[in-house]
Amino acid sequence: MKHTPDPWRRALIAGVAGTIVFTALLSLAPAAGSPVLNVALWDGTLVTLNLRLAAVLGYALEIGGATVLAYEYQIWLEPRLKGSTWLKGISLGAALWVVWMLVGLPLFDLISPLVNNGLMLAPGVFAWNFGAASAFFFLLGLLAFGIAVSWLAEDPSRYSYR
């Protein structure tokens, strides 16, 4: 008998996997001339400037946000999208990239204590201040995130573990 986890468990698995691939791809950005893109640390510094604690909190925030996003994707968005799992994932990743580049990074510029205290250069729209490689790696990371979430959140049969 096959057992399929509930939507929140699937969302958690998809959120964790998506966060891992996103983070892994961003970690490659400095090899292309980009500054270090440690989004978890950036997120955590919105709560504390203790950098060790900020990194841990940042990953918790990322995984929490990714889990909620994966849940909303599988409940609301996936049933409305047409096409293959891969195409849906690419669509999700591309949409997230546009929103992150046009809203997320400029908002981060305004509220980040790192930026406001001169400890970090403000990324700007489309990470303009960091260079094209940064925007490209954000795109790669979010496309991979979208594909991972789509693949893992859509089909409950992928979780047959009995």
Image: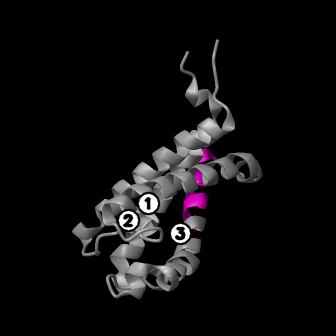
In the image, is residue 86 part of the stretch drawn in magenta?
yes
Q: Is residue 105 above or below residue 69?
A: below
- Residue at the (28%, 75%) spot, across then down: 35
Residues marked 3 and 1 touching at CB (< 8 Å): no
Dot 3, crowdedness within 10 Å: few (<14), some or many (≥20)? Answer: many
* Label at residue 97: 3
Image quarter of residue 12: top right
Q: How far is disc 2 from disc 1 in space, using C-alphas?
A: 5 Å
- Residue 82 placement, left or right of 106: right
Q: Is residue 81 above or below residue 33?
A: above
Q: Sequence order check: which comes first, mark 3 or mark 1? A: 1
Residues marked 2 and 1 touching at CB (< 8 Å): yes
> Range of the magenta residues?
84-94
| Percent of width and height locating residue 90 | 56, 57
Q: Nearer the viewer, mark 3 or mark 1?
A: 1
Q: How far is disc 2 from disc 3 in space, using C-alphas?
A: 19 Å
Residue where numbered disc 2 is placed: 41
Secondary structure state at the residue bearing disc 1 = helix
Q: Nearer the viewer, mark 2 or mark 3?
A: 2
Secondary structure state at the residue bearing disc 3 = helix
| Percent of width and height locating residue 39 | 41, 66
Q: Main secondary structure of the magenta part?
A: helix
Residue where numbered disc 1 is placed: 58
